[in-house]
Amino acid sequence: MALIIKRPNGTEDVIPKNINKWNTVENTARDVASMYGFKEIRIPTFENTELFQRSVGETTDVVQKEMYSVIAKETKFTLRPEGTAGTIRAMMQNGLLNEAMPQKVFYILSCFRHERPQAGRLREFHQFGVEMAGSSLPSADADVISMANDIINMLEIKNVELKINSIGCPKCRAEYHKALKGYFENKKDKLCDTCLSRLEKNPMRILDCKSPVCSEIAKDAPLILDYLCDECSEHFEKLKSYLDNLNIKFKVDPKIVRGLDYYTKTVFEFVTTDIGAQGTICGGGRYDGLIEQMGGQKTPALGFAMGLERLILTMENQGISFADDMQCSLYIAPMDESIVPYAMKLAAELRSSGLWVEYDTVGRGLKSQMKYSDKLGAAFTMVLGENEINEKKAKLKNMKTGEETDIILDSSFSKHFSDIAIGEMFDEVLENI
Ligand code: HAM
């Protein structure tokens, strides 16, 4: 029989044999986050559509083309296309921005964008992201970039380039917009319809249009770095010196403008060439105007997000090993049903000491139990029959070497399972059944 309904295009299942990859990446990111003093935040999967229109921006590809929105009971909601807007909303709504600054949070969440699926580009994908509010200083930029860099290094990912740029503040951006308008005005007839409307409202967005014609035209457009005001320029210079100070290699790439409207000053991306066209594994920057724009006090902020699927894909392509899952320590094979209560009780005791222990719960014969134990990857298998119970003796089979050890079913049993103190439990188990 064939499966009638399959998963939607651009979504993925993570089956148990791959979950260690996710755990490796998420645990590493969590560890690094705590080393930098970031605390976890969890936010809703959907928000009022207006939140993204106001923050991510009406003229962005994300808002114009990629959002999953529904109207429910006359209110328009959208599945979050990214984590920053919802996180900042939550920080504001819960009063976090009234506490001592900086406020630093991280999140691991799913995002939804209706893009054309390809390797490393999904319609539901996952991000590890951080947001820091309350510092306007370039040292905060350096700290956040250093954190992303540490995660990438701790995962042992290679061939990654950090690209940084400054896209200025509203003051210098006004001048830049004028220059961009002038440049694109002459090429108006070649631009796509979306970009034509962007020309009036937000010409910078033309720079990250995905249409081949628009991106070809955008190649020779004026560069924002030539229009930075003194303050933005100084901020950028200081950031560069801090990154040098931390020995973090970077390349200034004046073409990085990011696809979301809230950015100001510093923007950055970590890019690898090892996963094809969608090589940006991390993107972020400063967004000093967003909190005020959302109705809060003027509060500088910044952050980044990493695509978990892209990190995993990079690690797979680079042959990096993932942390192993826990191993099954013992498979107990009862000879017949009358022995099951012993097996059950013994398993319960060993599990309470933190071991992964299994016994037959499907009524297999002894031979197929041994096969199953092998499949499970159990370190040891122990056959329990009436003789074993009566004589308090059993054979412990090392599944790797095939070697069998006679063991006494008493407290000494525990020494076969290194570093876990099982204590006197075996005597007790046998006595209490
Ligand atoms: P973003 O660049 O749109 O930024 O996304 C961040 C990362 O999410 C990307 O670098 C990429 O690794 C991953 N990503 C994006 N779209 C997809 C997709 N369709 N499939 C798979 N992975 C994807 C943001 O979302 C900002 N909120 C980051 C930020 C946080 N800036 C400041 N704070």
Image: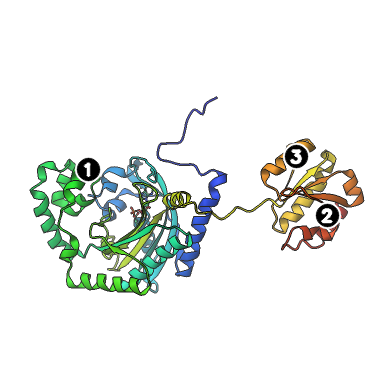
Left or right of 128 in this view: 432: right
Q: Please tell me how many numbered marks the rendered image carries.
A: 3
Where residue 294 sits in the image (x, y, percent)?
A: 29, 60
Whichever of callouts 1 and 2 sits on the residue coming sooner in the sequence is 1
Q: Inspect the image, locate mark 2, and give the three-letter code of the amino acid beneath it.
A: Val
Q: Is disc 2 surrounded by few (<14), some (14 to 19) or many (20+) residues within 10 Å? A: some
Q: Which residue is mark 3?
A: 369
Placement of 237 over or under 259, stated as above or below = below
Q: CA distance from mark 2 to mark 3?
A: 23 Å
Decide if residue 202 is in sight here: no
Q: Quadrant of residue 248?
A: bottom left
Instruction: Name the residue carrying label 1.
Output: 212
Tell me residue 272's x, y (percent): 37, 54
Q: Earlier in the sequence, mark 2 or mark 3?
A: 3
Residue annotated with mark 2: 429
- Quarter occupied by the N terminus: top right
Question: Where does the image place residue 68, in percent across and percent down from the top left?
Answer: 34, 43
Q: Amino acid at mark 3?
A: Gln
